[in-house]
Image (cartoon, rainbow, N blue to C red):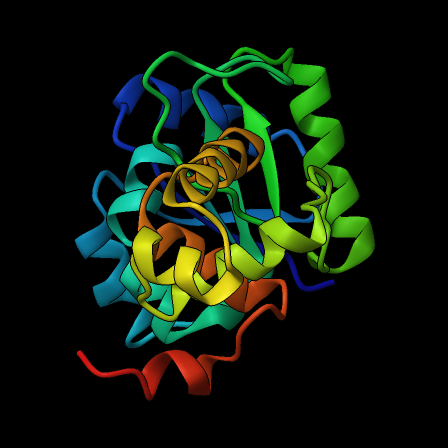
Amino acid sequence: MKKAGFILVIDSYLVRKGLVSILNRIPGIAVLQEFHNSESLASYLLKHSVDFIIISQSLFEASADLFIRDPALLEKTVLLKDGRPGGKKRGDSGSQAHSSIHMSEEKEKIEGKIQELLNLGGLKNGGLDSVELSPRETTIVRLVSMGLTNRQIADNLFLSAHTVMTHRKNISSKLGIKSVSGLTVYAIVNNIITIEEVTSLPA
């Protein structure tokens, strides 16, 4: 039986080793590589394929361009969040992948989530931590991904700039995404905008 290959991209050595010990207890899993930065991940992916990537929140944000270029990676990505499930860490700037685990969760719960991923054979839209945006929020995410400023979005939707900023804050709160690149990744994965539309935008 072929084992599912996992790549860990986690800046904290202790957290990375702790997660390796959890994964090694689950049958059918092989930890292929461990990285402490996103540059190493990008280099590795040029020559190798993976089944799953577990990446820490800060490194996911730092490597958003990688996922924009290859959004199929999001189908394999699990986000390792710093905060508690259902909570927001002060100053949180991480992004939302298809699924997430939290460093504060019990080992058994983390094992259960990983096992569920294996049983599903991959991650699908919505994942284990799906978040639902309103139609207006979805439209704003699309326009942000197209490179429009708050003022331009306000003009397009006949709203005030203040209202757009309020929607942006609500979106960030729901998704845990504050950067434009992070929202673009989210938009591509959730079929709000296509990769062709993003790559055709002027630099």
Residue at image coords 38%, 78%: 198
Residue nearest the observer in this picture, 54 or 74: 74
Residue nearest the observer in this picture, 108 or 103: 103
- Lateral position of residue 182 relative to residue 28, left or right: left
* In the image, farthest residue toward the right: 119
From the image, which quarter does the N terminus lie in?
A: bottom right
Image position, residue 38 (x, y; %):
24, 50
Residue 50 visible, this orientation: no
- Lateral position of residue 185 relative to residue 150, left or right: right
Image position, residue 68 (x, y; %):
38, 68
Q: Looking at the rendering, which quadrant does residue 51 occupy?
A: bottom right
Residue nearest the observer in this picture, 113 or 142: 142
Query: How many numbered circles does the render carry?
Result: 0
Image position, residue 148 (x, y; %):
33, 64
Image position, residue 125 (x, y; %):
71, 59
- Lateral position of residue 70 relative to residue 100, left or right: left
From the image, which quarter does the C terminus lie in?
A: bottom left
Residue at image coords 41%, 74%: 70
Residue 38 visible, this orientation: yes
**Where 95 falls versus 77 (above or below)?**
above
**Where 165 falls versus 41 (above or below)?**
above
**Where 133 falls versus 199 (above or below)?**
above
Residue at image coords 37%, 28%: 16
Residue nearest the observer in this picture, 106 or 143: 143
